[in-house]
Amino acid sequence: MQQQFDSDFCGSLPLSFINQIQPYGMLWVLDLESLEIVQISQNSSEYLGISHEAIIQNKLSQYTDEETIAQLRSKMSISGEKLPMTLTLAANGTKRVFHALIHHHEEYLVMELEPATAGKDSSFTSVYQEVRYIMAVIKSAATKNEVFNLAVKALKQLSGFDRIMIYEFDELWNGTVVAEVLEEGMDPYLGLRFPA
């Protein structure tokens, strides 16, 4: 089988960003701004049922939904981390779920993708990915209040609870609600002290 390489593109990337990878996953390189697919591993066709040549130069939005694109853009704002996420890619009427590690290098977004497996491992992997993302977001916070607000939002998303609060305690163990997220229609406790 004859292999075709874009030597100009490959020459501009470090050796770690070549289009040969282990067969249990695939690698996609996208333009950071437009999310145009500029390089992919050849085995992508095995996972999506479409030739890898046909995928290149298309936008990622052609293969996934807007919610996933928004989630991806949100994760891209965190620099210096390989961030996990789960995404669904669709081509030729077939949808597949993948676990991805994403990171950016200069003007490129690199996505390492593995097919998600059903069952217990998938559930653990999903929770692990979400916790790792939450930790990366919290790590990027600049102030204590920003950490609190990011933490309650992330814990609510992860747990599904109606209300999440963070208390700050004084030396007598009186607690003040310093951060809170809650369902619409619920009474807020933000700023309240317990015991009153």
Image (tube, rainbow, N blue to C red):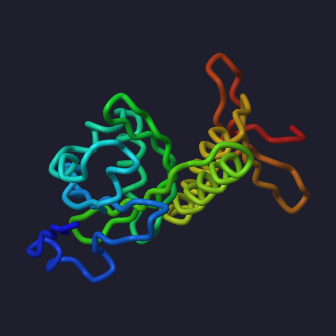
Relative to 132, is 168 on the left or the right?
right
Q: Give coordinates of residue 120: x percent, y percent.
A: 74, 47
Relative to 139, is 155 on the left or the right?
right
User: On screen, 1 above or below 165?
Assistant: below
Taking the view exactly as shown, the residue that stands out farthest to the front is 1
- Taking depth in this image into account, of 64 and 159 the one nearest to the observer is 64
Look at 22% across and 61% down and name the residue there: 39
Taking the view exactly as shown, the residue that stands out farthest to the top is 185
Q: Give coordinates of residue 26: x percent, y percent.
A: 39, 60
Relative to 10, is 102 on the left or the right?
right
Identify the image quadrant of residue 193: top right
Identify the image quadrant of the C terminus. Answer: top right
Identify the image quadrant of residue 189: top right
Look at 68% across and 37% down and name the residue there: 190
Look at 60% across and 42% down and name the residue there: 153
User: On screen, 67 above or below 98?
Assistant: above
Look at 76% across and 49% down and name the residue there: 167
Q: Give coordinates of residue 192: x percent, y percent.
A: 75, 37
Taking the view exactly as shown, the residue that stands out farthest to the left is 8
- Taking depth in this image into account, of 51 and 160 the one nearest to the observer is 51
